[in-house]
Amino acid sequence: MKRKISINRASQAGVSLIELMVGLTIGLIITAGALTILFSNQKLILEKDVMDRSQENFRFASMTITRLVRQANELGIPANNNELIVTFDRTQRDCLGQSNNSWINTFKVNANNELLCILNNDENLSYVLAKDISEIKFSYGIQNGTSANSLVYQQRFSGNSNTENTAVVNAWNTVTSVLTQMTVSEGNGKQPTIDFIATSHLLALTKLASSGGTSHANSANDTSGNSSSGSGGQTSGGSSSSGGESGGNNTGEGNNQNETPSTMDCSSTDLNYIKVNNVVWPDQTSYTISGIGKGGTVTVVVSGTISSSWRISRDDSTPQSLSSSQSYQLPNGNNKSMTLTLSCGTVPTRSITAKT
């Protein structure tokens, strides 16, 4: 006799098509949400990485420019407002961090948004310092009024033209600080512009300051350190019991008459150490250089120790102390020239004439 097996149909029931579609839809929604969060996090990470690189580029660029300006002994004449030329002692570190490597560094941005440093005005010695720098502009601190605090920063050229700003040109020999405006590309369309100021320690101590021509290092007294108001003689002579009749009665003259004038060291042997554009000065009397090119630079370098009494001036500008290295840029245009004059007391002057 065959045994009958009963089947419970309810226990074998499956899901309907509608239930399956609802389940798939919910799964897709959850998966899409998870992918959205994942992609958003990846985008944020990439943007943060770009911002970090941009900040690092700015930090390195600003620190390098600030360091070079602080150690500068001369600011070269730029070709436009987007260029900064710094001259310094060759024993100091240049923009590459190397000493005894260069003494003139030029900063500017190329078409690829890269900040370049050019060594010794040689385009073949051009190095990329930082990327994602879309623009850079330089302004120079000059006096704008009678107050010592009325220092303003103006660009060498007016706007985007080649017209020089007269206020800056006339005060060029007193400029000691540089304002840099650097625009950084962050990769998300934002291009913030960041400003920073650097001051040359050497220029601030040795040059006439930008605050109206008053020296940062010396007060407005005579060379002996005494006031020129006329009271020096009375204080040095004193009464008849201490100084007799030789001092106290000659107001304004007593002290200065007894002083020994300072001796100027104008030895011509110092000129044997001078090189002009890396060429030894032949006779140390007069020298003419031709074919430099429009806007070219003449560099006068002293490889040895030179007397502080020697001075150098460009054309009719105020003579300045001859330092270890100084550069001067020729005007743009054909048949342009400039004359550099070296002087020391009553010694006959020496001249260097440069022509395009």
Image (spheres, rainbow, N blue to C red):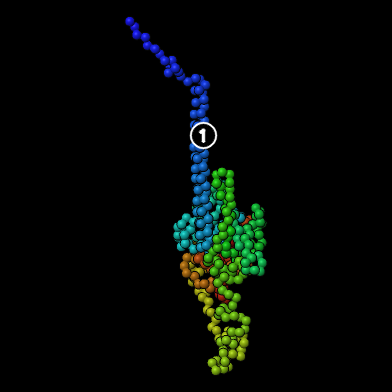
Report the residue marked by disc 1.
33
Toward the left, the furthest residue is 1
Residue at screen point 47% across, 69% down:
305
Residue at screen point 53% across, 66% down:
202
Helix, strand or loop under label 1: helix
Above or below 227: residue 277 = above
User: Could you say where residue 296 lies in the image, as x and y percent from the top left?
Assistant: 57, 57
Name the residue nearer the viewer: 261 or 232: 232
Q: What crowding class fits label 1: few (fewer than 14 Cα within 10 Å), some (14-19), or many (20 or more)?
A: few
User: Could you say where residue 228 lies in the image, as x and y percent from the top left?
Assistant: 61, 80
Above or below 353: residue 81 = above
Q: Does 180 sit left or right of 101 as displayed?
A: right
Image quadrant for the N terminus?
top left
Residue 157 visible at all: yes
Residue 122 visible at all: no
Above or below 297: residue 252 = below
Residue at screen point 45% across, 57% down:
98
Amino acid carrying mark 1 in the image: Gly
